[in-house]
Each structure stands twice: as C-alpha cells, then as structure tokens.
Image (cartoon, grey):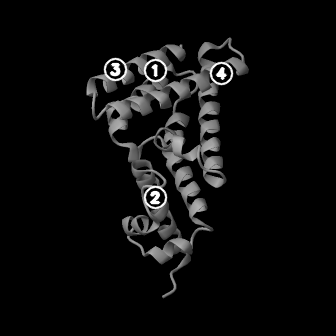
Amino acid sequence: MKVSKEQAEQNRDALLEAASRLYREHGLEGVGVAQIAREAGLTYDSLYGHFESKDHFAAEACEHAFINGIKKLRNVTPGDDKALAAYFKAYLSERHRDTPHDGCPIAALGAEAARKDGPIGETMTHGVETYVKLFGERYLTLGGNGSASASRDQAITTLAMMVGGMVLSRATSPSNPRLSKQVLAAVLDAVTKEGK
C-alpha cells in the first residue's frame, strides 16, 4: 500500500528520532537498522526507502541529534552570562551524564565518529564547528574587548572541556560515582570561569 507524502515524511522523522536516541545510547555499531525500525514502529524495509545508505542514515541521525543541543545554545543570548552559566550547568549535570540517548552527540559518539570516513565524520565536524561558532559569538559579546580569534580559541577550549568532562564522568560513574561527580563539578567551575 502506497503511503502519502505526508506519511512518508512522518515515517522518515520517526526513523531519525529513533536512530538518534539509540545511536547515542548504544553507539553507531551497537544497534542495527531492524531495531531502529522497530523503535520507530516501522518495518525494516521502510528504512531503505528513505535513505541512500546505512552510512547516510547514520549521518542524518547524528545531524538530528545535534538539533536540540544547538537550539539550546542558540537560545542563550550573546552577552547573557547567567544564561550561558545555566547552559553549562545543564550540560555538565548528572542528568545529562545518565541520559546519553537524550544528550550531546559529540560526547556520545565523537570517538566512534573519528573512526569513520564519509558522511558521519562530516556531520560530526559540522556539528563541532557550529558549537564553536555559537560559543565564540557568545564570548565575543561577554568581554566586549576580545578579538574574534581569541573568542574562537576560548570556544574550542570550552567545548573540549565540556565534552571531555562528560566522557570522563560517564566512564567513571559506574565504578566511582564520587569521582564522576567531581569531574562534573571541576569542569563546570572551569568553563564558568572561561566564560567570564
């Protein structure tokens, strides 16, 4: 039975939403397309009608995963250090640590994406570049006297600390919850100072 164009778009969105969650939770190699289709309430065959290849599908799912985090950062008005601090606090929280399926795709998939050529790596690079640009814009207006180059360097440093801190916190959480919390607190303190 042929589906309408509107239904086809809804199916495509459901597949991307399911894949973005499952990939962040289980990794790019930790989940198969059949499981993604089931999670989306669709059949295995329906997936291939929407995407050029498995790699292109994974890349689009990663892009989909970036949307929410980037939207949250875009909502921080440049120059609003309280809103930026709140963004840092939410990112470096135990809630984010414990829900990778709903969080930052760089922290969840960055190491895996580094081993992939093609569309997945390109999507990750584009997402990182977008975060760096947005952080840089916010830093440039916070100080008012910094250069765009210094703001970009500060943005890269901040993003690296946040992602690295989240990865370390997740890695240590099961066996040393105290250390995991200390990592989050230390990085939050550092990035909050970076933003001033």
Q: Residue at x 38, y 69 (%)?
A: 38
Q: Residue at x 71, y 21 (%)?
A: 148
Specify which label sits upstream in the sequence, 1 or 4.
Answer: 1
Specify which label sits upstream in the sequence, 2 or 3.
Answer: 2
Specify which label sits upstream in the sequence, 2 or 1.
Answer: 2
Residue 12, relative to residue 84: is it above or below? below
- Mark yes or no: residue 138 visible: no
Alpha carbon distance from label 1 to label 4: 21 Å
Kindly identify which residue carries mark 1: 82
**Left-right relation of 134 to 187:** right
Q: Nearer the viewer, residue 122 or 191?
A: 122
Dot 2 surroundings within 10 Å: few (below 14), some, or many (20 or more)? many
Q: Which mark is residue 182?
A: 3
Alpha carbon distance from label 2 to label 1: 34 Å
Specify which label sits upstream in the sequence, 1 or 3.
Answer: 1
Q: Position of residue 134 (x, y in %)?
A: 61, 32
Q: Which mark is residue 19?
A: 2
**Left-right relation of 178 to 125:** left
The answer to the question of whether label 1 and label 4 lie on touching residues, with beta carbons closer than 8 A, is no
